[in-house]
Image (cartoon, grey):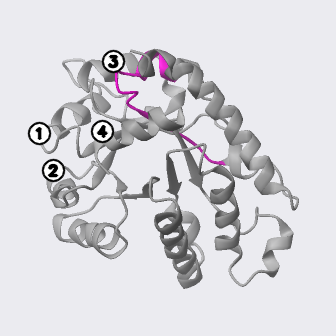
Amino acid sequence: MDKQQLFENIKRKKSFLCVGLDTDIKKIPEHLLKEEDPIFAFNKAIIDATADLCIAYKPNLAFYESMGVKGWIAFEKTVTYIKENYPDQFIIADAKRGDIGNTSAMYARTFFDELDIDSVTVAPYMGEDSVTPFLTYEGKWVILLALTSNKGSHDFQLTEDPNGERLFEKVLRKSQEWGNDGQMMYVVGATQGRAFEDIRKIVPNHFLLVPGVGAQGGSLEEVCKYGMNSTCGLIVNSSRGIIYVDKTEKFAEAARNAAKEVQQQMAEQLKGVINA
């Protein structure tokens, strides 16, 4: 899926919502534990309930890897189900990979060759040769961690060099030598507020994947005010705030209602972009 196709989906659905599939076997409704594959059964119900309200799904690999082979099977079934039934959805493998070149090449092969997923999150800390293997796949996206939503982001990402450049700003500037806004996005946490202004000065045209709205306390209005560009430029993720709002047999309906509420807020924020 290219940048224009992504924007067309956003305009058509009046949404830039990504539903995070952080599926924890200990948090899903109890009645699903009777299913042959409880994780996939939960994901399928969530996807069917929300697909018309969002433009992306983001399975977080840690939740699947924690279950070993069973988890990987559920992950692959989830990806296949989305691709076969909702092909307009942008799929993000939230894997946060990033290692020396040969290892990164194997990670890239896993997600882009074997699973044929649209994008994968990558940690840029080890530099260019840990990222560029992911950028060799035409039509695929690399989503680099830039400024995250967790408290610990202050430990390194906001530290300044002698010239006053913060580490996340160095990541944004340097990485543009490796790829362009048609193949790279950046993770920027919703809790970072006005930092989006500084980020847009460096990467005005890139899409930003924005976690942290909802359970983590990020403000959608603030994200849009400082981070939206002429093609929206935002994919805002919500996980717990949608998938775990109800633990009864009506969990999918509740998830849909939660997603609908976010989508309606997004439709308001998009009016200036869509009507321009």
Residue found 47% across the figure and 53% down from its top: 89
Between circles 4 and 2, the one closer to the viewer is: 4
Between circles 2 and 1, the one closer to the viewer is: 1
Residue 131, how many percent across, how many down? 21, 54
> Is 165 situated left or right of 212 in this image?
left
Q: Nearer the viewer, residue 20 or 63?
A: 20
Task: Say which amino acid is labelled 1.
Answer: Glu
Residue 27, how many percent across, how many down? 76, 61
Task: Say which amino acid is labelled 2.
Answer: Glu
SS at mark 3 in the image: helix
Between circles 3 and 4, the one closer to the viewer is: 4
Mark 1 in CB contact with mark 3 (< 8 angstroms): no
SS at mark 2 in the image: helix
Question: How far apart are the alpha carbons under marks 2 and 1?
Answer: 9 Å
Specify whether residue 27 is painted magenta.
no
Q: Nearer the viewer, residue 100 or 13?
A: 13
The reply to whether residue 195 is in sight is: no
Q: Nearer the viewer, residue 218 or 32?
A: 32
Q: Which residue is mark 4?
A: 4
Question: How far apart are the alpha carbons under marks 2 and 3?
Answer: 23 Å
| Vertical relation: 204 (above or below) 18 | above
Looking at the rendered image, the quarter that the C terminus falls into is top left
Q: Which residue is mark 3?
A: 198
Between circles 4 and 1, the one closer to the viewer is: 4
Badge 2 density bin: few <14, some 14–19, many ≥20, Cα 10 Å: some
Q: Which residue is mark 1?
A: 177
Where are the magenta residues, as a range? Answer: 223-239
Q: Which mark is residue 128?
A: 2
Between discs 2 and 1, the one toward the N terminus: 2
> Is 27 situated left or right of 186 in this image?
right
Residue found 53% across the figure and 84% down from its top: 69
Mark 4 in CB contact with mark 2 (< 8 angstroms): no
